[in-house]
Image (cartoon, grey):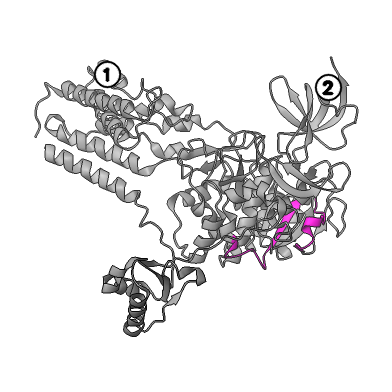
Amino acid sequence: MSINVTGTIERKGLGPGTWAIVTEEGETYELYQGAPDELLKSGVKAKIKGEVRDDVMTFAMIGPVLEVKSFKVVD
Amino acid sequence: MRKVFILCLFIIGLGFAIFNFKGLATRGTYDSIVLDFREDVPAAQIAGKLSAIAQQYHVNPFLNSEFSIKDNVYIVKGDANLLNALKKSDIAKATESIEPNYIYNAYEVPNDPHYTKQWNLRSINVEAAWEETKGSGMTVAVIDTGVSRVPDLKDTKFVKGYDFVNDKEEADDDNGHGTHVAGTIAQSTNNGYGVAGIAYEASIMPLKVLSGSGGGTVADISEAIKFAADNGADVINMSLGGGGASELMQEAVDYAYSKGVVIVAAAGNENRNSSSYPARYPHVISVAATGPAGEKAPYSNFGAGVDISAPGGSETGKILQETIDYQTGEPVFAEYQGTSMASPHVAGVAALVKASGVENPDEIETVLTKSARVVTEDPLNHFGAGHLDAAAAVKFAQKGQITFRDFFRWLRENGYLNLRFWFDGGAVALLPKIAMVLGSYILAWFLRNYLPGWSWSLSGGLIFGSSGLFFLRGFYVFDLPQWPFRVLGSSIPELGNAVQGTIALNPIFASVLIPLALIALLLGNRSWKWFAIGSGIGVASCLLVSAVMMPNVMWLGEGLLARSFLIVNAILCYGLSWLSMQGEQKTA
């Protein structure tokens, strides 16, 4: 199931750390491996089209895991 | 009638005192006795007394050390009988004291130089546990990002593992998370280097299921659980979570459980009121995280499914172990935080418990939860059974007397069957609730001459006023808010603080106001009137018991002010009910 998420990219400090996108409503999605490097910068506002991976577990455990299909940096 | 009332209060007070009785203060052990003779007694006289003791009691008094000559401190071998005999004899007159020579034990403090920074190990009381066992012979499977043999794992034993991400035998770490978790469980300890681990004589089975960026599939994790069960793991630690329910994974968990493996998992880091998968599966111990002061860590999940809490660290203090650097792959001492860090504390102590002779995974869980330090005020289940205590767990395990399975556990096990419900047995302090219900019936009994008989409406009012359906307070449905159950499980006085889930009573609800409103509204109705009257009596009982046992009212504190407020309102409630009954025909 494909969804659109708009929010701010953050580096979360759990364990050695992980990348996440936090929406304005305060929902946190963990970004799944293989997300492009251009996206993975703290403070970047982005609109991501992706898929929530229900079959994936992580050590960060901060919320649903979002596999990025495409994204757009927004101001 | 006054006598009956005083008797009832006495019984309630006595019951309370018995429940809080902690037994005699703990005493040390000794196998010798110290005799400290007075300095003004001449040496010749002391020599005479000593030879008299030697003859009479067949013991051989000796100086404690060469420094004892000046102070006249002598030691004799002996037990409590000799101690009493000496104290009663005329020798006592020549001494300053005769007392047991208590044996002091130095706890096992390891020589690892950074051990002083490991507040987390002291907070679980591990030094006293190490006196009994260090987990020798146990195997703990670490299902994670892999484990690299950093210098401070050099003396740690390893058994064969597997890398399910890259499908190979060596399960090295390319992230740092798994090595850190393994360090908490069994970092090489007393090696004069780095930091300590909990069960440092146990073996680690490294199983890599998470990639270098920290994610892994349910399929790989399930296979790793089965691998651990088939290859002799005693404990499995899973510092991972997320996703949804998976039959494949539940099957793997059940399989490992059936083979006697203890399974521990992190509750999750979303700060919400349900454990993540896999922590919420049946037979998995779900671990919430605490900070250095024992407080709930800000990120930690809580509520449904949480079985116990352990140090996971917070911004004020994190967990230090040796691992590899995320970017360079080089060994580094790193401070991490997360329920990922809390879970291996419990896994390590589970290994210590199993090494102490408790085999069955259910019994090991019982030992861990029953020995945990209870957090008395935990209405939202931040801590499960309480704070992990390694020393208490090992001592409890060695007693080998886990024969009972309590009612709440039974409820929880059965609630677990469909993965929807969960029951927190610690949410309700049972004794005050029973006192409140009993108290309301006793108060009603005083007014029996005015009552038309025991009706359902009266009983309903008594219960709603005094205790509510209190067993509902510990009831959870996964992923739903818990406050509706707290409200349903509350009596009238507790309604004002049920939604927030706090302990202090709201003085608007814990007063005569609601019974007054109920009576005003319902006095015209023949049967509902008795519900209103019953609720007035019930509230009176609830407020009285609260005033005696735990006065705690919002804005009024926990002292005399709160107590007086509760008692005055209890009297008003009782008086109100009595007044509303006037005019009824006596039925006695």
Residue B128 percent location from the top left of the image: 56, 59
**Front one among B410 and B200:** B200
Residue B58 percent location from the top left of the image: 36, 84
Residue B418 percent location from the top left of the image: 58, 45
What is the spatial separation of the Cα atoms under label 2 and label 1, in whole angstroms? 59 Å
Residue B394 magenta-highlighted: no
Q: Look at the numbered disc 1 and give the secondary structure of its residue.
A: helix
Which contiguous range is marked in magenta? B130-157
Query: What amino acid is at disc 2?
Result: Val
Quadrant (top left, top right, bottom left, bottom right) of the C terminus of chain A:
top right
Q: Look at the numbered disc 2 and give the secondary structure of its residue.
A: loop
Query: What amino acid is at disc 1?
Result: Leu
Residue B399 percent location from the top left of the image: 48, 65
Neighbour class for label 2 at 10 Å: few (<14), some, many (≥20)? Answer: some
**Front one among B264 and B418:** B264
Residue occupied by mark 1: B516
**Vertical order, B65 against B5 (above or below):** below
Residue occupied by mark 2: A44
Tell me which residue sits at (29%, 36%) in the image. Answer: B548
Residue B142 magenta-highlighted: yes
Q: In which image quadrant can residue B48 be found?
A: bottom left
**Front one among B184 and B9:** B184
**Vertical order, B142 against B92 (above or below):** above
